[in-house]
Every structure is written in structure tokens, then in C-alpha cells.
């Protein structure tokens, strides 16, 4: 992203916050004319505006490692959804690998490898980026360590509960689970793999104290939300067909 684009986005943040601040001042009569309270709220908005703009301006968008990490953050979930849909329709990985299970393992290895590449460039980007004075304190690091630890706990325990085929889109290969998993971490999160991964990115960004890491964590969350919109209805359809076939057999 060029400096001019960064300036435009920063100006947009400033304008939006100024509008919100003005709106609060305009609304003062509706709150019984309590001007001191509304002034305080307005000042808080201005402080938040300054922090947002500063954090954004600290990001070096020219950094190649950051660009590559953002690319893989966006590419990976799009890739595995396209490949999984193709497998469901054509069984090309099953044919290539010789069985559905081996095909799923092949996809799992590919997804895992792409994740390693993404994580490598993310870490390189954090080393290259400017440290934010807003994030350089022990409390922020403690929060980061906590988020990272809990995120990894969600990821690892969900993989343990689901196994390789359950984790890596085995449903699209016809490898279906007998029943829904309700044990931890699925009793505290509907999508612990995605949420745990997002928390891990966020925690890492806070540990390093880099605003660029916060941006990447936000993008990770955005892409996972998009992936869920594609995966959840399709997976539900797969299991509905399985249940319908079972019902017909029993009749």
C-alpha cells in the first residue's frame, strides 16, 4: 500500500471519528444538556482516533514479508475450499491418491504446509515492522501470551477430538463422523480451530508489540468468517444427504 493510500485511510479514520464526536455534541440536549458528560465522551473519541491513526501509520506496507503473509492469509482458505469442493464433485484427490483417506491426508499435508509458509512470513514481517509504543508494555505482553496459549489450546484439542480427517475436510471425501463432537473445546466454541488460530495471531502480535500483527490478525478473522460462510452450509448439506440416505434404508 502506497503512502498516499495510507494517508487517505488515516484521513478517513480521522473524519469518521470527528463526525461521531460532532454527533455526540449535537445530541447533548437529548441527554438533558449534560455538556460535561458529552465533552468527556467526545474527548474519548478523539483519543481513540489518535490511537487508531497512529497504529495504522506505524505499519510498513512496503515490507515484502508482510505482503506475502497477507497473501497467504487470504489465499489459504480460498484454496482449501475450492479444492474440497472439487474433490466432492469429482473425487480427483481420491483417484490421485488411491483412496479417500489418502486423498484427505494429501490435502491435509498441503493445507498444513501452506499454513507453515504463512506463519513463516508473518513472523518475518513482525521482525521487520515498527514496534508500537502503545503495545510496548508488560501487561500487553501478558495478554498476548494468554491469548496465544488459549488459542493453541483450542487448536490442538480440536485436532485431537476430530482427528486428521475431521480437521482437514474429510467430509468432502465422504469420511463422515458418526455424531457431532460436544467435548472440549467444542463445548466452549463452535469453531475452535478458526477461533484458536485467530487468537494465536492476535496473541503473537501483542507479544511482539507490532501494529502490523494486529492488522494480519484482523484479516485472519475476516477470512475465517468468509470460509465459515462457505463451509458450514455445505457441510450441513453433506450430512443431511447422509441422514436422508440412512432414513431411506431403514424404511
Image (tube, helix red, strand yellow):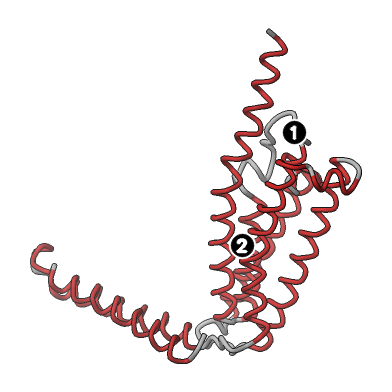
Mark linked to residue 198: 2
Q: CA distance from mark 1 to mark 2?
A: 25 Å
Rendered residue at 61%/63% (across/down): 199
Apparent side of residue 116 relative to residue 147 in the rendered image (left or right): right
Please tell me how crowded label 2 is: few (under 14), some (14-19), or many (20+) other residues with Cα within 10 Å. Answer: many
Tell me if I can see residue 125 in this picture.
yes
The image quarter containing residue 11 is bottom left
Q: Nearer the viewer, residue 178 or 229?
A: 229
Expressed as whole percent of the image width and height from the top left, the position of residue 170 reads 76, 42
Q: Which of the 4 image quarters holds residue 120?
A: bottom right
Q: Secondary structure at mark 2?
A: helix
Q: Please provide percent x and percent y for residue 9.
A: 40, 82
Mark 1 residue crowding within 10 angstroms, few (<14) / some (14–19) / many (20+): few
Residue at x 23%, y 76% (from the top left corner): 19
Identify the residue at horizontal 32%, vertical 82% (top origin): 14
What residue sits right under mark 1 in the picture?
Answer: 177
In the image, taking residue 71 as reference, residue 98 lies left or right, namely right
- Callout count: 2
Pointer 1 or 2: first along the chain: 1
Q: Position of residue 100 (x, y in %)?
A: 84, 40
Picture residue at 62% right of the left edge, 80% below the top: 67
137 left or right of 158? left
Task: Check residue 208 in the rendering and tell me which mark sits there, or answer none.
Answer: none
Q: For marks 1 and 2, give the one nearer the viewer.
A: 1
Query: Relative to the observer, which residue lies in front, 127 or 113?
Result: 113
Q: Label 2 near label 1: C-beta < 8 Å?
A: no
Q: Residue 107, relative to residue 11: is it above or below? A: above
Q: Quadrant of the C terminus?
A: top right
Amino acid at each position: 500500500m502506497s503512502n498516499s493510500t495510507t494517508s487517505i485511510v488515516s484521513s478517513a479514520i480521522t473524519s469518521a471519528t470527528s463526525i461521531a464526536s460532532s454527533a455526540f455534541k449535537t445530541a447533548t440536549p437529548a441527554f438533558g444538556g449534560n455538556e460535561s458528560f458529552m465533552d468527556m465522551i467526545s474527548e474519548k473519541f478523539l483519543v481513540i482516533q489518535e490511537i487508531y491513526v497512529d497504529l495504522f501509520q506505524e505499519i510498513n506496507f512496503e515490507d515484502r514479508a508482510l505482503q506475502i503473509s497477507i497473501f497467504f492469509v487470504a489465499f489459504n482458505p480460498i484454496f482449501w475450499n475450492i479444492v474440497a469442493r472439487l474433490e466432492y464433485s469429482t473425487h480427483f484427490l481420491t483417484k490421485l491418491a488411491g483412496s479417500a483417506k489418502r486423498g484427505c491426508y494429501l490435502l491435509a499435508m498441503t493445507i498444513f504446509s501452506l499454513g507453515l509458509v504463512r506463519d513463516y512470513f508473518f513472523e518475518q514481517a513482525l521482525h521487520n515492522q515498527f514496534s508500537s509504543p502503545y503495545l510496548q508494555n508488560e501487561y500487553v505482553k501478558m495478554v498476548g501470551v494468554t491469548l496465544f496459549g488459549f488459542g493453541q489450546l483450542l487448536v490442538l484439542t480440536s485436532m485431537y477430538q476430530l482427528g486428521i480427517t475431521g480437521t482437514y475436510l474429510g467430509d468432502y471425501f465422504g469420511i463422515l463422523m458418526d455424531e457431532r463432537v460436544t467435548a472440549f473445546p467444542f463445548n466452549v466454541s463452535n469453531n475452535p480451530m478458526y477461533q484458536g488460530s485467530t487468537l494465536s495471531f492476535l496473541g503473537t502480535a501483542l507479544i511482539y508489540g507490532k501494529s502490523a500483527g494486529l492488522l494480519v490478525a484482523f484479516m485472519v478473522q475476516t477470512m475465517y468468517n468468509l470460509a465459515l460462510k462457505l463451509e458450514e452450509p455445505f457441510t450441513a448439506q453433506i450430512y443431511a444427504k447422509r441422514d436422508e440416505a440412512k432414513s431411506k434404508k431403514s424404511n
